[in-house]
Image (cartoon, rainbow, N blue to C red):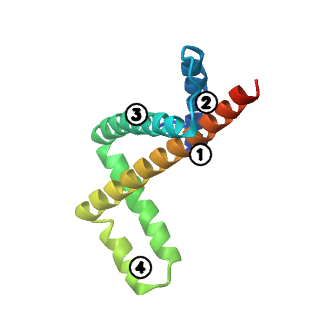
Amino acid sequence: MTLHPLGIFLFLPANLAWAISRYSRHRPIAIGSGQGARMGAMMGLLSFTFFLAFFLISISVQRAQYHDLMVSQIQQISAQNPDPQAQQLLQWFTTPDGLIAFTAFTLFTLLLLCLALGSGSGALVGALRKRKDTFS
């Protein structure tokens, strides 16, 4: 949670490649792209679960700071958008119900990103490892 959001694009695939290489050392059968994708999806789900736990603890401890930060960010976005309907929607996000909906939508999007990134990088690492094992 303290890392830059782009850290997920670097650390999740790197940790997944490391986990697959460690796993394949102890298994006589090469890991294919399907098994790599499943391992990646599971690692993405576990990564999101740990992130969610720390995020919820952080929000519960610093509720006022989170509310103020999110409201100021939403108001900045609203000021840059000339569409009145978009501004109305963005202003609804500053209400307590809207802020909960916005946070839930953001967390759901992050979950999908973790699953997609984990599955994709797991399939890629599995395919590359299988090709390397085939040529060896």
Residue 70 in the image: state x and y as whole percent: 40, 57
Residue type at mark 4 is: Ala
Numbered disc 3: secondary structure: helix
Q: Residue at x 51, y 40 (%)?
A: 34
What residue would you read off at disc 1? 6
Residue type at mark 2 is: Ala
Residue type at mark 1 is: Leu
Q: Residue at x 58, y 21 (%)?
A: 24
What residue would you read off at disc 3? 46
Q: Earlier in the sequence, mark 1 or mark 4?
A: 1
How far is disc 1 from disc 4 in space, using C-alphas? 27 Å
Q: Residue at x 56, y 45 (%)?
A: 120
Numbered disc 4: secondary structure: helix
Q: Is residue 58 above or below residue 112?
A: above
Please report contact status of discs 3 and 4: CB closer than 8 Å, yes or no.
no
Q: Earlier in the sequence, mark 3 or mark 1?
A: 1
Residue 37 in the image: state x and y as whole percent: 51, 40
What residue would you read off at disc 4? 86
How far is disc 4 from disc 2 in space, using C-alphas? 42 Å
Please report contact status of discs 2 and 1: CB closer than 8 Å, yes or no.
no
Disc number for residue 20: none
How far is disc 2 from disc 3 in space, using C-alphas? 16 Å
Q: Earlier in the sequence, mark 2 or mark 3?
A: 2
- How many other residues sit within 10 Å of disc 1, few (<14), some (14-19) or many (≥20)? few
Most extreme residue toward the left is 97
Relative to 80, is 68 on the left or the right? left
Most extreme residue toward the top is 26
Numbered disc 2: secondary structure: helix
Foreground pick, 8 / 64: 8
Residue type at mark 3 is: Leu
